[in-house]
């Protein structure tokens, strides 16, 4: 039975409390309770195993061929932001994301920094929209 929640926080609380038995969650939200033994990860949904949880198989490895669903985070600005400002912000963000201490901290939380250009990020957003539009149409939503 699908149980809708207003965010992963309340769902994780109910999962930890035994009110629900399973959830699909962003690794960043559940890596700590998994590492502490409070939750058990069944599979990751990325194309490769997580650096934070290397013993957890991918969904494909667990027997779900073609099941790859990733989540990502990015920095966006209003559409009319001058390109010179976007370039400057992007350069500063990429510089920080390449710092070993920050990369290690982010990786320990289950995420993997992926510095890119505004154009590359735009392509990612477009490709994700195309994938999820197909899913929405197929599901009749």
Image: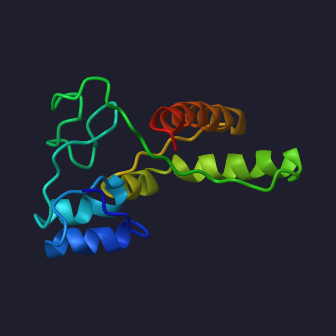
- Residue at the spot x=64%, y=33% of the render? 126
- Residue at the spot x=70%, y=39% of the render? 118
Image coordinates for residue 140, horizontal then vertical, percent: 50, 39
Q: Residue furthest left?
A: 37
> Which quarter of the rendering shows the N terminus?
bottom left
Image coordinates for residue 43, horizontal then vertical, percent: 20, 42
* Horizontal relation, residue 116 to residue 60: left or right: right
Vertical arrangement, residue 23 with respect to residue 113, above or below = below
Image coordinates for residue 60, horizontal then vertical, percent: 23, 28
Q: Nearer the viewer, residue 126 or 104?
A: 126
Q: How is the image coloured?
A: rainbow
Vertical arrangement, residue 50 with respect to residue 92, above or below = above
In this rendering, the count of numbered labels is: 0
Q: Nearer the viewer, residue 134 or 92?
A: 134
Vertical arrangement, residue 98 with respect to residue 25, above or below = above
* Horizontal relation, residue 38 to residue 4: left or right: left
Q: Residue furthest top?
A: 65
- Residue at the spot x=86%, y=47% of the render? 84
* Horizontal relation, residue 9 to residue 52: left or right: right
- Residue at the spot x=23%, y=73% of the render? 14
Q: Residue furthest front?
A: 140
């Amino acid at each position: 039975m699908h149980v809708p929640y207003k965010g992963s926080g309340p769902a994780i609380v109910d999962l930890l409390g035994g009110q629900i038995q399973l959830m699909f969650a962003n690794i960043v939200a559940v890596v700590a309770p998994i590492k502490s033994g409070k939750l058990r990860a069944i599979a990751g949904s990325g194309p490769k195993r997580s650096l934070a949880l290397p013993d957890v198989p991918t969904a494909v490895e667990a027997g779900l061929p073609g099941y790859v669903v990733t989540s990502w985070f990015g920095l966006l600005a209003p559409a009319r932001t001058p390109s010179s400002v976007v370039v400057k912000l992007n350069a500063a963000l990429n510089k920080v994301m390449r710092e070993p201490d920050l990369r290690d901290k982010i990786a320990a939380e289950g995420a993997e920094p992926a510095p890119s250009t505004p154009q590359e990020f735009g392509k990612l957003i477009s490709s994700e929209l195309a994938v999820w539009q197909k899913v929405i149409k197929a599901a009749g939503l």
